[in-house]
Amino acid sequence: GQQLNQSPQSMFIQEGEDVSMNCTSSSIFNTWLWYKQDPGEGPVLLIALYKAGELTSNGRLTAQFGITRKDSFLNISASIPSDVGIYFCAGQLRAIQGAQKLVFGQGTRLTINP
Amino acid sequence: NAGVTQTPKFRILKIGQSMTLQCAQDMNHNYMYWYRQDPGMGLKLIYYSVGAGITDKGEVPNGYNVSRSTTEDFPLRLELAAPSQTSVYFCASSYGAGEQFFGPGTRLTVL
C-alpha cells in the first residue's frame, strides 16, 4: 500500500526556535493534511492543502503542497511550549461514495526545552 | 456536543478472547472510520462506513469486523484476539468528505 515518509522522526529545540518537517510519498495525493496529536488523545487537524503548489498558514503554522503532489512540508515559527506533541502528515485518497481514506506518515515528535 | 466518544479507554485481553470496541458520535456525521496506531507509528485505516448498512475495508482489516446499524454508532469487533492486535484504536467521523474528527482512543493490550 501507499507509504508516507516523514522526517525528522524527532526534534529537540529551544523555545522560540522555528521548526520544519516534511513528508514525501511515492504516490500522488490530491489532498495533504497535517495533524497534531497530544498524549492520550486523537489527532487534531491543523492544516489542509488541496492544490499542488498551495501555501497555507494557520497562525504560526505554514504548510505547502508540493508541485509534484508527492510531498508537503510544515513549518512552525517561534515555537512555544504548547507546540509539544507529535505531528503527522496524511495523504487523502477518495473511497466509495466520496469517503476519504487517510494514509499517515510515521510522525515527528517535537520536544521543546524552555 | 460530546463529539466522538469511545469505550472502553483501556482493555487487556487474553489471546483468543473477543471484544467489541464502541464508538459513537453526536454530530450527525454520515461517515465513520476505525484506525489503529501502533507504538511510534502513524494511524492505519481498518474499516470505514459511509452510512447505515454500508461498510468497506481499509488498509488493515484482517482480524476485525464492523457493522453500522445506526448513524450514531460504529462498533469494531475483534474475534480471536492476537498479540499483533495490541494497539491504540481510534474512531473518527466526518460529514461527507470534510474534516475527520477523532475520538480519544481505546488502548488495547493482548497477552
Image (spheres, coloured by chain):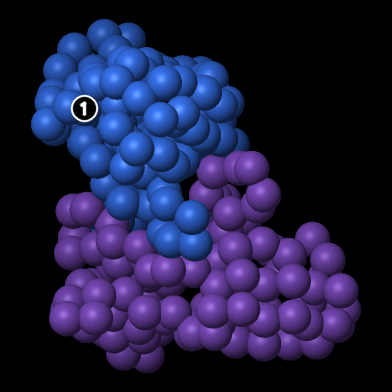
Chain colours: A blue, B purple
Label 1 resides on the chain identified as: A
Looking at the image, residue A3 lies above or below residue B76: above
Residue extending furthest toward the front? A114
Q: Quadrant of residue A50?
A: top left
Tell me: A55 left or right of A92.
left
Q: Is residue A35 visible?
A: no
Residue extending furthest toward the bottom? B69
Tell me: A33 left or right of A88.
left
Tell me: A21 left or right of A3.
left
Looking at the image, residue B111 lies above or below residue A61: below
Between B103 and B36, the one nearer to me in the picture: B103
Residue at image coords 54%, 85%: B8
SS of the residue at dot 1? strand
Give residue B86's position: percent from left, percent from top. Answer: 73, 65
Residue at image coords 67%, 81%: B11
Query: Which quarter of the figure is the N terminus of chain A placed in?
Result: top right
Count residues near mark 1 (Cα–Cα under 10 Å), then give few for <14, some for 14-19, many for 20+.
some
Looking at the image, residue A67 lies above or below residue A101: above
Q: Is residue B24 visible?
A: yes
Give residue B94's position: percent from left, percent from top. Answer: 24, 63
Q: Which residue is mark 1?
A: A61
Give residue A65's position: percent from left, percent from top. Answer: 25, 19
Q: Quadrant of residue A75?
A: top left
Please state which amino acid type lies under the numbered disc 1: Leu
Give residue B62's position: percent from left, percent from top. Answer: 69, 64
Residue at image coords 30%, 26%: A79
Residue extending furthest toward the top? A67
